[in-house]
Structure formats: structure tokens, C-alpha cells
Image (spheres, rainbow, N blue to C red):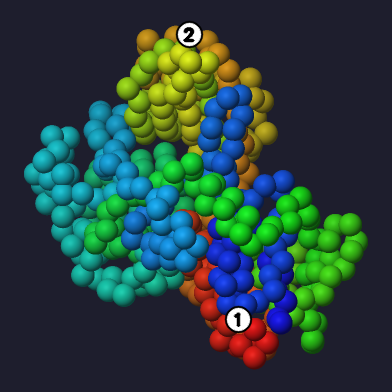
Amino acid sequence: MTTVCVIGAGIAGLSAATRLKRAGYDVTVYEAQPSVGGRAANCEREGMRFTSGANIFYGFSPAMRALLADNGLSHVARRLPRLQARCIGESGQWSVDMTPTPQFLTSRDFSIADKLRLARFMAGIVLGARGADGDDACSTLAHDGETLRAFCEPRMGRVLTEKMVGIVYRSARGMGLDDISPSTFISMMRALAFDRSVMAIDGGIGAIAAKLGEDVGVATGVKVRDVAEREDCCTVTLESGEQRHFDLATVAVEGNQARNLVSTAGAEERAFLGRVTYNATIYCHCLLAGAHPGGQWFLSGPRFPWISAAKVSAVTDEGQPAIHVTLTVAPEIVQRSGVDIAEDEVLDRCLTDLRGLFPTLHAAPKRWFVQKVASKTPLFVPGYGVEAAQFRALQEAPERRVFYAGDYLYQPLLGGAALSGAHIADHIARHWPDLG
């Protein structure tokens, strides 16, 4: 029986591991953290529940739907109602849908000319990006060398680009329009034109990872120091110094960590992995007494110098109504100062902005904490999609034994991670079937 080692128990690693195990391979999964999930893990701190990263997925994702169905988990997914955010910026207030909907045409926040311009823009994406896969940004590389701003502004105008695209990417993803190529945006928007559903998981996204990890048997708290490809095996060296030998290995850690993990990687592979970057994010979580209808706000301009988003959720605390407020520190501040800002300063500055947004929420938090995420989302900068596609082609060599999986190779979404793991498992099944 072929032995396969999977390093990393995020969605990409678990997607590969469960698929390989069902196909009859002997799979060992190592996860450095004490629990599975990676950037999709359920967490709880100071009585507040949150995720380490993603908390939804898009219904257009066949990879996520297959991952759930293949593992008997389709029943835990539920469709969310229309998701909107109220935006406040220098040009006023308006609402945006997190997915394109026909209701935009009835909005009072935009002129008829704006509505027609956006409709033409979406029609151009649908007609011009045939064959696009919402789980794979590399399926739409025609504009990969441009910035998202350069793609949108000539087609939508500067103001509409900022109000419909710019504030969403800045507030929800911590990215600027000049930071990334349009490849991720085009592939997602075309998929959303046909399936606008947004899905959540009962118990949180982390519940999927926990169940998959339980099924495949993950060794948590085990750090891998080195992966080396040999002529007849792969040698995996643990932090303890123990060496274990496997027929194949899949490295499913963040791309910026994979470069130093595989000592036998070729120059071309190391060069690409050295260019993988992630944005950092800081969240301030506060639990306040009282009640609030909840909602989500995207913020910009001098009125809110410290926070770019505020999410308010109604919860209970010790049997009493309470409010869990999640405040996202503005990406410009994180880019300038990094994630090492003093937590007391983060709280004070964020609360000042929060009280500017909701003057009635003046009481001090009952409890609070700061969540610092050093690597949140891989950045598909201009030209990156072409390089990722070339790197993926290197993994198609039938004789290789070490593979890479992660959203940084497909799409910075859960669906991209799931597709990446599935593709590696399918490649192994094709090229090593006699040993399976």
C-alpha cells in the first residue's frame, strides 16, 4: 500500500488526505497546531466565538460541495440570506451586496446611470470570461498583468469602482485595488453571476475541519522540520529529530512556509514560493452588555482612521443579552506598523471609532481581546496567476514524489483550498495507481 504524508491539516491538506484515504492509500497527516483547521478553525476566547480566518464559502464552489458530499457533510451547510454591508465614506452612505444581485437595480443609493454601467460591466465579465472557474483564479489570466483598479475603472468609472469594489476589498479582505490582479475578481464574479448563494456551516467552518480530521486521523501538535524527496521515497524529519519515510508527501502549509520546508525543492520551485505573500490583519473583539439588531459596516475616510469594518452580532452572556463586536483594524495601519501594535492601543483606538459609528455604545467592554493574524489571505498580485499556473505545471511530472497544496495556488477562498487538495489527490491516483 502506498504511504502518503500530508503536512498541514487546513482545508487543502484535509481535502487531499480524505480523498486519498478513500482511494485506499495509507495516509498520515501532521499538523503543527494543537487543533486542525488552519485558517478555517473554530476558536473561543473570553467567552466569544470566532474563526481563525474564513467563516463562509460560496455556493458556486463545486470543490467545497464535493468535499462535503464525499464525506457525508452536505447536511451541515445552510444557505445564508442576502448579505449586505452598510458603507460609510467621504462620499456619504450606501449599501453593497456581498454578491451581485438584481436588487441593486432597485437601490436608491445609486443613479440610473450607475446601475446601467454596473449591469454592462457584469455582462462583459459573463460573456468575456467563458470557461472561468470560481475556484481557480488561474482560469482567467487574460488581465493577470493588470491591477484590479486598472481593470475596473475604465469599465465602471472611478467613483463606482471605489464604492462597489474598492471598499469591499479593503474592508472585507484587507486589500487595495492597486495590490492585486483582477484574476481572482473576474473568476469569482462570473461564477457568482450564475450562483449567488453564500453558505455557512452549522457549528462554524471549523466543524468541517474537525470532522474531516477525526475521520482521517490527524497527529496534532507535531511539527515537521524538513521534507526531502529521494529517488525511492520521501524523508520527513520531525522537530524531535525523528525521521520517517513515505512513498509520497503533500506539503499543505502556507506558501511562504513551504519554501523552507522542502530542502530538495528545485530552484524554480523555491523562486516561486519565495514570492508568495500574505496580508496581515488585526481584529479587536469586544463583548458589550445590551442589545443591538446586528449587521455589518464597511468604513473609510478620516472619520474612521483606525477601523475599516465593524460586525455586530447579538449573543447571550450569562443568560443576558449581549453584543459581540468585531472591529477590523484598517489595512493601512497594519501595513505601516505590522501586527506588533500594543493591544491596549488597539482597543482604545478601535473603541473611539466604534463610538463614532454608534454613539449609544458608550459603555466599556465587559471583556475584550485582540486577534492578530500574520498571514490571512494570499495576495494574487499582478502577474502572480501566470506564475502560479507555471508552478502547478511542475507538479504534473509523473515521477515526482513531493507535491504542494493550498489556496495560494488556486483561489484565496475555501473553494480554492479544497480544489487544490483534490487535484493533488487525483494526480497521485493517476500516476501511482499500481501502488494504491
Tell me the residue at 32%/22% (across/down): 293
**Quadrant in which the N terminus appears:** bottom right
Q: Residues within 10 Å of mark 1 (few under 14, many from 20)?
A: many
The percent coordinates of residue 113 (x first, y second) are 10, 47
Looking at the rendered structure, the secondary structure element under dot 2 is loop
Which residue was labeled with disc 2? 363
Q: Identity of the amino acid at label 2?
A: Ala
**Quadrant in which the C terminus appears:** bottom right
Image mark for residue 428: 1
Report, in whole angstroms, how far the alpha carbon at label 2 lies from the one at label 1: 57 Å
Asked if residue 422 can be seen in this view, the reply is yes
Left or right side of 164 for 232: right
Between disc 2 and disc 1, the foreground one is 1
The percent coordinates of residue 310 (x first, y second) are 42, 29
Looking at the rendered structure, the secondary structure element under dot 1 is helix
Mark 2 vs 1, N-terminal side: 2
Tell me the residue at 27%/58% (across/down): 195
